[in-house]
Image (spheres, grey):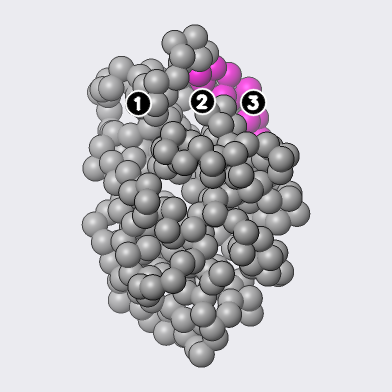
Amino acid sequence: MNLGLVVSTLGRTEPLERLLRSLSAQVRPDDRLVLVAQDHLAEVERLAERFRGDAFVIEVTTSPRGASRGRNAGVAALPPGGDRLLHFPNDTTWFPDGSLDAIRAEASVLEAGALTVIDEHGPKFTLPRDSSPLDRWNVWTVIEMGLLIRRSVFEELGGFDPDLGTGAPSPWQAGEATDLLLRLIERRPDLARAFDWLPPDVAVGGIADARGLSATERRRKLRAYGRGLGRLVMRHRYPWWWRLAFVFGGIAFGLRHRTTNTVADGWWVFLGRAEGMLGRTIGGSSTAVTR
Protein backbone atom coordinates (compact mmCIF):
# COMPACT_ATOMS: atom_id res chain seq x y z
CA MET A 1 0.00 0.00 0.00
CA ASN A 2 1.67 3.20 -1.20
CA LEU A 3 1.13 6.54 0.50
CA GLY A 4 -0.53 9.66 -0.87
CA LEU A 5 0.41 12.73 1.17
CA VAL A 6 -1.68 15.81 0.36
CA VAL A 7 -0.76 19.26 1.70
CA SER A 8 -2.95 22.32 1.17
CA THR A 9 -0.86 25.47 1.65
CA LEU A 10 -0.96 29.23 1.24
CA GLY A 11 2.67 29.05 0.19
CA ARG A 12 4.50 29.42 3.48
CA THR A 13 7.86 28.13 2.31
CA GLU A 14 9.70 28.10 5.65
CA PRO A 15 7.49 25.48 7.38
CA LEU A 16 7.08 23.67 4.05
CA GLU A 17 10.83 23.25 3.83
CA ARG A 18 10.89 21.65 7.28
CA LEU A 19 8.09 19.30 6.19
CA LEU A 20 9.97 18.29 3.02
CA ARG A 21 13.23 17.76 4.90
CA SER A 22 11.48 15.49 7.39
CA LEU A 23 10.02 13.42 4.53
CA SER A 24 13.02 13.28 2.20
CA ALA A 25 14.71 10.26 3.81
CA GLN A 26 11.46 8.42 4.58
CA VAL A 27 9.43 8.35 1.34
CA ARG A 28 9.65 5.52 -1.19
CA PRO A 29 9.61 5.82 -4.99
CA ASP A 30 5.94 4.80 -5.30
CA ASP A 31 4.74 7.26 -2.66
CA ARG A 32 3.40 10.60 -3.84
CA LEU A 33 3.37 14.02 -2.22
CA VAL A 34 1.00 16.63 -3.64
CA LEU A 35 1.44 20.27 -2.66
CA VAL A 36 -1.67 22.33 -3.40
CA ALA A 37 -0.49 25.93 -3.50
CA GLN A 38 -3.38 28.33 -3.06
CA ASP A 39 -0.97 31.27 -3.08
CA HIS A 40 2.71 31.83 -4.00
CA LEU A 41 2.58 29.01 -6.56
CA ALA A 42 5.96 29.87 -8.11
CA GLU A 43 7.72 29.82 -4.72
CA VAL A 44 6.19 26.46 -3.83
CA GLU A 45 7.23 25.03 -7.20
CA ARG A 46 10.81 26.21 -6.72
CA LEU A 47 10.94 24.66 -3.26
CA ALA A 48 9.54 21.36 -4.56
CA GLU A 49 12.16 21.28 -7.31
CA ARG A 50 14.93 21.41 -4.71
CA PHE A 51 13.68 18.20 -3.11
CA ARG A 52 12.47 16.22 -6.11
CA GLY A 53 14.35 13.06 -6.94
CA ASP A 54 13.90 9.46 -8.08
CA ALA A 55 12.77 8.49 -4.58
CA PHE A 56 10.83 11.66 -3.79
CA VAL A 57 8.07 12.38 -6.29
CA ILE A 58 6.41 15.73 -5.61
CA GLU A 59 3.48 17.12 -7.59
CA VAL A 60 2.49 20.77 -7.34
CA THR A 61 -0.99 21.96 -8.26
CA THR A 62 -3.35 24.73 -7.23
CA SER A 63 -6.99 25.24 -6.33
CA PRO A 64 -9.38 27.92 -5.08
CA ARG A 65 -8.87 28.99 -1.45
CA GLY A 66 -9.95 26.71 1.36
CA ALA A 67 -8.13 23.79 3.01
CA SER A 68 -10.88 21.31 2.09
CA ARG A 69 -10.90 22.39 -1.54
CA GLY A 70 -7.14 22.07 -1.62
CA ARG A 71 -7.11 18.59 -0.13
CA ASN A 72 -9.80 17.39 -2.54
CA ALA A 73 -7.81 18.84 -5.46
CA GLY A 74 -4.67 17.14 -4.18
CA VAL A 75 -6.33 13.73 -4.04
CA ALA A 76 -7.64 14.26 -7.58
CA ALA A 77 -4.06 15.04 -8.71
CA LEU A 78 -2.74 11.68 -7.51
CA PRO A 79 -2.00 9.12 -10.26
CA PRO A 80 -5.08 7.12 -11.28
CA GLY A 81 -5.26 3.40 -10.75
CA GLY A 82 -4.60 1.40 -7.63
CA ASP A 83 -5.38 2.43 -4.10
CA ARG A 84 -3.34 4.57 -1.71
CA LEU A 85 -3.37 5.34 1.96
CA LEU A 86 -4.07 9.07 2.20
CA HIS A 87 -2.69 11.40 4.82
CA PHE A 88 -3.29 15.15 5.07
CA PRO A 89 -0.40 17.00 6.76
CA ASN A 90 -0.60 20.74 7.28
CA ASP A 91 2.21 22.81 5.83
CA THR A 92 3.42 23.17 9.43
CA THR A 93 3.47 19.39 10.03
CA TRP A 94 6.73 17.47 10.30
CA PHE A 95 7.45 13.73 10.41
CA PRO A 96 9.76 12.29 13.09
CA ASP A 97 12.30 9.74 11.89
CA GLY A 98 10.67 6.36 11.34
CA SER A 99 7.11 7.69 11.36
CA LEU A 100 6.36 6.84 7.72
CA ASP A 101 7.62 3.27 8.20
CA ALA A 102 5.39 2.98 11.26
CA ILE A 103 2.41 4.18 9.22
CA ARG A 104 3.34 1.90 6.34
CA ALA A 105 3.44 -1.09 8.70
CA GLU A 106 -0.30 -0.57 9.29
CA ALA A 107 -1.19 0.38 5.73
CA SER A 108 -1.88 -3.06 4.25
CA VAL A 109 -4.75 -3.74 6.67
CA LEU A 110 -5.88 -0.17 7.41
CA GLU A 111 -8.84 1.33 5.57
CA ALA A 112 -9.53 4.19 7.96
CA GLY A 113 -7.67 5.21 11.09
CA ALA A 114 -5.94 7.95 13.04
CA LEU A 115 -2.58 8.74 14.56
CA THR A 116 -1.48 11.12 17.29
CA VAL A 117 -0.56 14.72 16.50
CA ILE A 118 1.85 16.42 18.89
CA ASP A 119 2.90 20.03 19.29
CA GLU A 120 5.24 21.82 21.68
CA HIS A 121 2.76 21.19 24.52
CA GLY A 122 2.27 17.47 23.89
CA PRO A 123 -0.50 15.48 22.15
CA LYS A 124 -3.32 17.59 20.76
CA PHE A 125 -5.75 14.76 21.63
CA THR A 126 -5.46 11.44 23.42
CA LEU A 127 -6.79 8.78 21.07
CA PRO A 128 -8.95 5.85 22.21
CA ARG A 129 -7.55 2.34 22.60
CA ASP A 130 -7.03 0.43 19.37
CA SER A 131 -9.93 -1.95 20.05
CA SER A 132 -12.42 0.95 20.26
CA PRO A 133 -14.83 1.45 17.36
CA LEU A 134 -15.16 4.92 15.87
CA ASP A 135 -18.39 6.47 17.11
CA ARG A 136 -20.20 9.82 17.36
CA TRP A 137 -18.50 10.61 20.67
CA ASN A 138 -14.83 9.81 20.03
CA VAL A 139 -14.84 11.09 16.44
CA TRP A 140 -13.92 14.55 17.80
CA THR A 141 -10.43 13.31 18.71
CA VAL A 142 -9.45 12.92 15.02
CA ILE A 143 -8.10 16.05 13.34
CA GLU A 144 -7.18 16.48 9.69
CA MET A 145 -3.42 15.96 10.05
CA GLY A 146 -4.05 12.81 12.09
CA LEU A 147 -6.44 11.18 9.61
CA LEU A 148 -5.46 8.09 7.60
CA ILE A 149 -7.91 6.80 4.99
CA ARG A 150 -7.71 4.80 1.79
CA ARG A 151 -8.33 6.75 -1.38
CA SER A 152 -11.12 4.39 -2.41
CA VAL A 153 -12.98 5.04 0.86
CA PHE A 154 -12.32 8.79 0.70
CA GLU A 155 -13.82 8.96 -2.79
CA GLU A 156 -16.73 6.71 -1.85
CA LEU A 157 -17.61 9.21 0.88
CA GLY A 158 -17.33 12.16 -1.50
CA GLY A 159 -14.18 13.70 0.02
CA PHE A 160 -14.12 16.71 2.31
CA ASP A 161 -17.06 19.10 2.26
CA PRO A 162 -15.59 22.23 0.55
CA ASP A 163 -17.91 24.43 2.62
CA LEU A 164 -16.24 23.34 5.86
CA GLY A 165 -12.79 24.15 7.19
CA THR A 166 -10.18 26.89 7.27
CA GLY A 167 -10.58 29.30 4.37
CA ALA A 168 -13.89 27.83 3.23
CA PRO A 169 -16.35 30.19 1.48
CA SER A 170 -18.70 29.87 4.43
CA PRO A 171 -18.64 30.82 8.12
CA TRP A 172 -18.05 27.15 9.10
CA GLN A 173 -14.27 27.22 9.49
CA ALA A 174 -13.54 23.82 11.05
CA GLY A 175 -14.74 20.24 11.25
CA GLU A 176 -14.08 18.83 7.79
CA ALA A 177 -12.42 15.63 9.09
CA THR A 178 -15.12 15.19 11.73
CA ASP A 179 -17.83 15.57 9.09
CA LEU A 180 -16.10 13.04 6.79
CA LEU A 181 -15.85 10.49 9.58
CA LEU A 182 -19.43 11.02 10.73
CA ARG A 183 -20.45 10.18 7.16
CA LEU A 184 -18.23 7.08 7.37
CA ILE A 185 -19.98 5.98 10.58
CA GLU A 186 -23.35 6.36 8.86
CA ARG A 187 -22.51 4.81 5.48
CA ARG A 188 -19.77 2.31 6.37
CA PRO A 189 -20.41 1.04 9.89
CA ASP A 190 -18.14 -1.91 9.11
CA LEU A 191 -15.19 0.46 8.77
CA ALA A 192 -16.21 2.36 11.89
CA ARG A 193 -16.11 -0.90 13.86
CA ALA A 194 -12.68 -1.71 12.40
CA PHE A 195 -11.27 1.82 12.76
CA ASP A 196 -7.53 1.67 13.44
CA TRP A 197 -6.25 3.83 16.30
CA LEU A 198 -2.48 3.75 15.92
CA PRO A 199 -0.38 3.52 19.11
CA PRO A 200 0.63 6.85 20.68
CA ASP A 201 4.29 6.42 19.72
CA VAL A 202 3.27 6.73 16.04
CA ALA A 203 2.89 10.49 15.79
CA VAL A 204 3.47 13.51 13.58
CA GLY A 205 4.56 16.92 14.77
CA GLY A 206 2.72 20.19 14.43
CA ILE A 207 2.37 23.58 16.08
CA ALA A 208 -0.08 24.91 18.64
CA ASP A 209 -3.09 26.59 17.05
CA ALA A 210 -2.39 29.84 18.88
CA ARG A 211 1.31 30.14 18.00
CA GLY A 212 2.24 33.52 16.54
CA LEU A 213 -1.23 35.02 16.93
CA SER A 214 -2.20 38.18 18.76
CA ALA A 215 -5.02 37.96 21.31
CA THR A 216 -7.44 39.41 18.73
CA GLU A 217 -6.36 36.93 16.03
CA ARG A 218 -6.48 34.01 18.46
CA ARG A 219 -10.03 34.80 19.55
CA ARG A 220 -11.18 35.34 15.99
CA LYS A 221 -9.79 31.92 15.09
CA LEU A 222 -11.35 30.23 18.13
CA ARG A 223 -14.71 31.74 17.27
CA ALA A 224 -14.49 30.70 13.61
CA TYR A 225 -13.43 27.16 14.49
CA GLY A 226 -16.15 26.91 17.14
CA ARG A 227 -18.68 28.05 14.55
CA GLY A 228 -17.78 25.16 12.23
CA LEU A 229 -17.99 22.58 15.00
CA GLY A 230 -21.28 24.02 16.22
CA ARG A 231 -22.67 23.59 12.72
CA LEU A 232 -21.74 19.90 12.75
CA VAL A 233 -23.69 19.05 15.90
CA MET A 234 -26.80 20.34 14.12
CA ARG A 235 -26.07 18.79 10.73
CA HIS A 236 -25.46 15.36 12.22
CA ARG A 237 -28.39 15.55 14.63
CA TYR A 238 -26.69 15.16 18.00
CA PRO A 239 -29.12 14.94 20.94
CA TRP A 240 -30.32 18.29 22.27
CA TRP A 241 -28.81 17.71 25.71
CA TRP A 242 -25.41 17.09 24.08
CA ARG A 243 -25.70 20.15 21.84
CA LEU A 244 -26.36 22.38 24.83
CA ALA A 245 -23.51 20.82 26.82
CA PHE A 246 -21.20 21.30 23.83
CA VAL A 247 -22.08 24.97 23.39
CA PHE A 248 -21.95 25.97 27.05
CA GLY A 249 -18.87 23.81 27.58
CA GLY A 250 -17.06 26.23 25.28
CA ILE A 251 -16.97 28.76 28.13
CA ALA A 252 -14.50 26.50 29.96
CA PHE A 253 -12.18 26.18 26.95
CA GLY A 254 -9.69 28.70 28.33
CA LEU A 255 -9.55 26.87 31.66
CA ARG A 256 -8.86 23.55 29.94
CA HIS A 257 -6.11 25.03 27.75
CA ARG A 258 -4.29 27.38 30.10
CA THR A 259 -0.91 26.86 28.40
CA THR A 260 -2.10 28.47 25.15
CA ASN A 261 -5.22 30.45 26.06
CA THR A 262 -6.68 32.78 28.65
CA VAL A 263 -9.84 32.20 30.65
CA ALA A 264 -11.65 34.87 28.63
CA ASP A 265 -11.00 32.98 25.39
CA GLY A 266 -13.74 30.55 26.36
CA TRP A 267 -16.41 33.17 25.67
CA TRP A 268 -15.26 33.36 22.04
CA VAL A 269 -15.47 29.59 21.71
CA PHE A 270 -18.96 29.72 23.22
CA LEU A 271 -20.02 32.47 20.82
CA GLY A 272 -18.72 30.58 17.79
CA ARG A 273 -20.41 27.32 18.78
CA ALA A 274 -23.66 29.19 19.39
CA GLU A 275 -23.43 30.79 15.94
CA GLY A 276 -22.89 27.37 14.42
CA MET A 277 -25.96 25.97 16.12
CA LEU A 278 -28.04 28.98 15.06
CA GLY A 279 -26.73 28.73 11.49
CA ARG A 280 -25.77 32.39 11.28
CA THR A 281 -23.04 34.80 12.35
CA ILE A 282 -23.64 37.62 14.77
CA GLY A 283 -21.57 40.43 13.25
CA GLY A 284 -17.81 40.30 12.78
CA SER A 285 -15.68 38.40 10.28
CA SER A 286 -16.82 34.96 9.20
CA THR A 287 -13.39 33.49 8.44
CA ALA A 288 -10.51 32.23 10.57
CA VAL A 289 -7.22 34.07 10.56
CA THR A 290 -4.66 33.47 7.82
CA ARG A 291 -1.24 32.37 9.02
Q: What residue type is labelled 2?
A: Asp
Q: Where is residue 163 in the image (x, y as percent from the top left)?
A: 28, 41
Q: Which amino acid does label 3 sit on?
A: Arg
Residue 152 falls in image quadrant:
bottom left
- Residue labelled with disc 3: 256
Of pointers 3 and 1, the one earlier in the residue sequence: 1
Q: Residue at x 54, y 72 (%)?
A: 2
SS type, badge 1: helix
Q: Residue 235 carries which label?
A: 1
Q: Which of 76 and 201 is in front in this view?
A: 76
Please indicate, yes or no, whether residue 154 appears anywhere in the rendered image: yes
Q: Is residue 247 magenta?
A: yes
Q: Position of residue 225 (x, y in %)?
A: 42, 34
Left or right of 123: which side holds 60? Answer: left
Residue 38 falls in image quadrant:
bottom left
The residues colored magenta run 246-261
Estimate how packed mark 1 is, as few (under 14), some (14 to 19) or many (20 or more) residues with alpha carbons within 10 Å.
few
Please indicate, yes or no, whether residue 67 appears anywhere in the rendered image: no
* 3D distance between C-alphas at marks 3 and 2: 11 Å
- Residue labelled with disc 2: 265
